[in-house]
Image: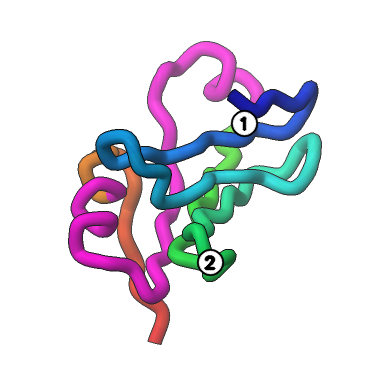
Amino acid sequence: MRWHLWRRIYDLYLGNRQFAVVENKGFWNWTFSLVDEDDKLLAQIDRNWRGTGFEMLASMLSGLVMMYKATSLLTYRLLYLGMWVPTFPS
């Protein structure tokens, strides 16, 4: 398990095999990058800031998932999050 004091790092596994890493690059960074084992960018997750009161009192999030060259299984797993609105860059 990797841990950092102010950065969020998530290792994603499919069974026992790690297939991607979700990581943000700063203390107040609201954009998370999803990178595969070859360090290729699969997707970016961008949280929308809706205000201090809303962030503290509500338990729902809004954001944007931008998919790049992802496999269909990974696409379905990210879209399963439900609250994210998928967009596909042209």
Q: Is residue 74 left or right of residue 66?
A: left
Q: Amino acid at mark 1?
A: Gly
Residue that badge 2 annotates: 38
Relative image position of residue 47 (x, y in whole percent): 53, 44
* CA separation in Å, label 2 and label 1: 36 Å
Magenta stretch encompasses residue 1: no
Residue occupying the point 31% across, 60% down: 86
**Which quadrant holds the N terminus?**
top right
Q: Which mark is residue 20?
A: none
Magenta stretch encompasses residue 59: yes
Crowd class of label 1 (few under 14; some 14 to 19; many from 20; radius 10 Å) = few
Nearer the viewer's eye, disc 2 or disc 1?
A: 2
Residue occupying the point 49% across, 52% down: 45
Residue that badge 1 annotates: 51
Is tag 2's residue or tag 1's residue first in the polypeptide sequence?
Answer: 2
- Count the marks: how many? 2
Relative image position of residue 8 (x, y in whole percent): 64, 33
Of residues 20 and 60, the one nearer the viewer is 20
Most extreme residue toward the front is 16
Relative image position of residue 28 (x, y in whole percent): 76, 37
Q: Quadrant of residue 43?
A: bottom left
> Range of the magenta residues?
52-78
Of residues 5 and 31, the one nearer the viewer is 5
Relative image position of residue 79 (x, y in whole percent): 25, 49
Q: Quadrant of residue 72?
A: bottom left
Element carrying mark 1: loop
**Which quadrant holds the C terminus?**
bottom left
Of residues 46 and 41, the one nearer the viewer is 41
Element carrying mark 2: loop
Q: Is residue 54 above or below residue 36?
A: above
Q: Is residue 41 left or right of residue 71?
A: right
Residue occupying the point 48% across, 59% down: 36
